[in-house]
Image: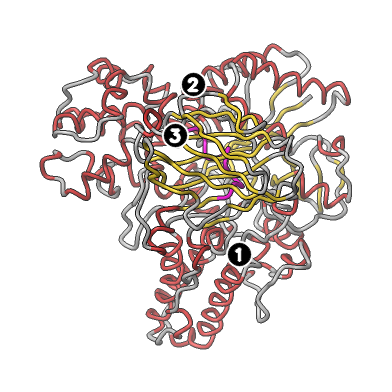
Amino acid sequence: MNISFIWHMHQPDYRDANGIVQMPWVFLHAIKDYYDMPWMMAIHGGMKATFNITAPLIEQLKLYYDDAAKYDKFLSLWVNDPYFLQENDRNWILKLCKSTQFDTMVKPFDRYVELYNQEHFNNSELIDLEMMFMLSWCGVYLRKSSSVVKELIKKQRDYSCEDKVWLLKELSSFVSHIFEYYTQLHNDGVISLCTTPLNHPILPLLVDMNNALSANPNTNIPKEHISLRDDALKQVQKAKELFEDTFGFLPNGFWPAEGAVDEKSVALLRECGIKWIATDEAILFKSLNSDYRANLYTPYDYDGMCIGFRDHYLSDLIGFTYRHKNTHEASQHFMDELLKIENINSADTVFVILDGENAWEFFTNNGYDFFNALYNDLQNASWCKTLTMDEVYELPKKELPFLAAGSWIHGEFNTWVGHSEKTRGWELIYLTKRDYERHKDNLDEHTKEKISEHFLAAECSDWFWWYGDDHYTEFGVEFDELFRNHLINIYDLMDVTAPADILIPIIKDKSAQNFWLKPQSDISPLVNGKRDSFFEWIGAGVIDESKLFSTMDKQRGPIKKIYYGQDDEKIYFSFEIKMKKLCIDSIMELIIEPLNIRGNIKFKTQKTFIGDLEVDVACENWLEMSIDKTKIKEDEIFIRFEVKDGSKVVQTLPGFGELKLDLGNDYSQNWFI
């Protein structure tokens, strides 16, 4: 059996109009993950994998080479003496320094634990918190290999501003060699490297918007759509140029953004010299009109393009499930799953493709122990070996006569077009493109190039992800403004007044939709009261009580947000709380109608019964609970909560009244991967 791992290394573009990175996640993942992931594999001789490095990641990581704080808002504040910080900057530093995962990243440092729950800081304490934050993000390689990091970790307290400068200089130097390390491993045959079109666009929608209808005939696409194939070609060509400039060679393969493919975009990639791509199993099953899983485990040839199809289940085991398991238990479980496939056909090739950076902060020791166990087990299994995608390309392939259009979310494109807001975004791009075609003959080449950059940026998938009501963000208005500003800038460069349509926000006041996102899929989170992965709650409903209060002018309570959802057996709730003392002093009354059930829940209690319904409760950093629904006969119930401090009701949830739950809801149309 062959196993081909593809690790997708990507961060969104956090730069503002002045080129300043507004959030530090590229840098933090660089010191924790971007070197560690290939290094953890390479120390196990004979292991191989493929790494997909996206253009926004490449461009932003290079900003940290010489002066890490120069182009990063957070680092420019972090490195300074807190005495000179404005109050809002100080509060922002505190917010980020307390955003670290507690169990896996804070707990290993006694001083960090000591400071984590503190509310007020003098300047000396803030410097200690800043240092603990940065050191907690240093990966296993740095902790083992950097004398500076080791010495500063040993110190634990009473840090100085000079220590911050010393550490940042060390980390900046480390970051500047990451891509050199990838190049070295590629040249040694240990890894393959690939990339994604420049601004992470949904290539099939650029080439032909009718692909959205092909994937789902009910999709509402713009009536006057035009092909943006020329832009799609530029997205691919410019990504190749940046990749070659960074690594010294051209990539053989691409991971299409969001695994989005169709026959025309694959033909374009092939035209650009791309030999292989990868996407999700849902596309294969649609292409074959069959979900027979034995079809999955082989490379395919579609019209001269080699394609690997991702095993959804195995990939999600690593990304979402194994952090809850014992290291060796998780590795053995993965090997057992592989062996089931091996027993069917020993010639199989299995494709495991997932995010290469965001999951590991939820693993003990940044995933090092898990990967050490997994790579040892893979090496010791004589019946399997790992291959890069460049090596997979050389294997015999099964012919694929037809390739369905779709992405790895629903096997459709409705995440990026269909909702009125998403479709409106495309309409504005088409409007701007038509106006550009009328005026371009009056423009010089430099201006045309600037305009092209704005078009390519406006075609980024991220804008359309946040339009509509299928995903939740507090920064929707800001995303909307950034998107439309690219189009406004095009008109400015043409010296043409922008149409009023582009000046009007796409995201408007939506009343309840501002604070209420309905559930999109089943969820089965672990109820432990901790700040676990947000992935557990993907697809959950979200009620933002803080926005509800501002809309209805109600007094704020200790709970800011409610996340909720269900699976076949339980209803789940997670409450984001302002005060940890809530878990110590308060109780919550649960009211369920029409069951006429009501009863108090003490947060210290792990398990209780309200009526004949079993309720599990956990309260640490979050208040979480599950309610057994197997004994509920009604199809619909209405739930309310009252938070009490003594006999006083300090908050009623949800703030708009009762939460209606359809216990038989089928979310299969909303599932995404």
In the rendered view of the protein, which quadrant contains the C terminus? top right
Is residue 533 within the magenta segment? yes
Q: Residue at x 53, y 23 (%)?
A: 606
Q: CA distance from mark 3 to mark 1?
A: 56 Å
* Circle 2 crowding by C-alpha within 10 Å: few under 14, some 14–19, many from 20: some
In the rendered view of the protein, which quadrant contains the N terminus? top right
Q: CA distance from mark 1 to mark 2?
A: 41 Å
Secondary-structure class at tag 1: helix
Work out whether mark 3 precedes mark 2 in sequence or the reverse, and give the earlier one: 2
Query: Image height check: is 301 above or below 392?
Result: below
Q: x and y percent of residue 313 in the render?
A: 72, 34
Numbered range of the magenta stretch? 531-541
Left-right relation of 641 to 497: right
Left-right relation of 267 to 588: right
Secondary-structure class at tag 2: helix
Judging depth in this view, the residue of 462 and 128 nearest the camera is 128
Amino acid type at image mark 2: Thr
Amino acid type at image mark 1: Ala
Quarter occupied by residue 549: bottom left
- Label of residue 232 in the image: 1
Residue under pointer 2: 364
Q: Residue at x 11, y 44 (%)?
A: 84
In the image, which is nearer the foreground, mark 1 or mark 2?
2
